[in-house]
Amino acid sequence: MKPGYGVDDGAALHFADDVLLRTVSSRIGAKSHYVSINDQQEVDEQALNVLFLGERV
């Protein structure tokens, strides 16, 4: 498996020049992760900080 990103509905990844600048969300609780395989051939999921862009009510 190649490393990559997983994002919930309502979340998006903001890239510039192939560099991840931030993860944003229009939905409270939406998450995103960077997923890869570690040296023990196990799935490694790293949670990314998500900036909520909406108005909290």
Image (cartoon, helix red, strand yellow):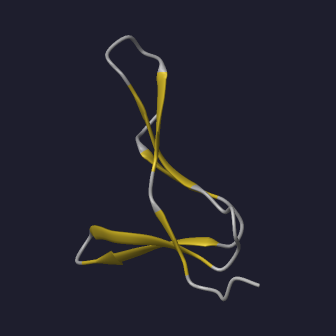
Q: Nearer the viewer, residue 49 or 20?
A: 49
Q: Nearer the viewer, residue 2 or 16?
A: 16
Question: Residue pushed farthest front?
Answer: 57
Identify the residue at horizontal 70%, vertical 74% (top origin): 27
Q: Quadrant of the C terminus?
A: bottom right
- How many badges with numbers are in the image? 0
* The image quarter in which residue 3 lies: top left
Question: Residue pushed farthest top?
Answer: 40
Q: Would residue 1 appear left or right of 53 to someone viewing this image?
A: left
Examine the rendered structure and indicate whether residue 41 appears above or below residue 3: above
* The image quarter in which residue 25 lies: bottom right
Query: Residue 48's spot in the image, x, y percent?
Result: 45, 53
Query: Residue 2's spot in the image, x, y percent?
Result: 42, 39
Question: Residue pushed farthest bottom?
Answer: 55
Identify the residue at horizontal 38%, vertical 10% (top origin): 40
Q: Would residue 42 appear left or right of 9 to someone viewing this image?
A: left
Q: Would residue 22 appear left or right of 47 to someone viewing this image?
A: left
Query: Residue 29's spot in the image, x, y percent?
Result: 69, 62
Examine the rendered structure and indicate whether residue 5 appears above or below residue 46: below
Query: Residue 15's spot in the image, x, y percent?
Result: 34, 75
Q: Nearer the viewer, residue 42 or 32?
A: 32
Identify the residue at horizontal 65%, vertical 80% (top origin): 26
Q: Would residue 43 appear left or right of 25 to someone viewing this image?
A: left
Q: Nearer the viewer, residue 32 or 2?
A: 32
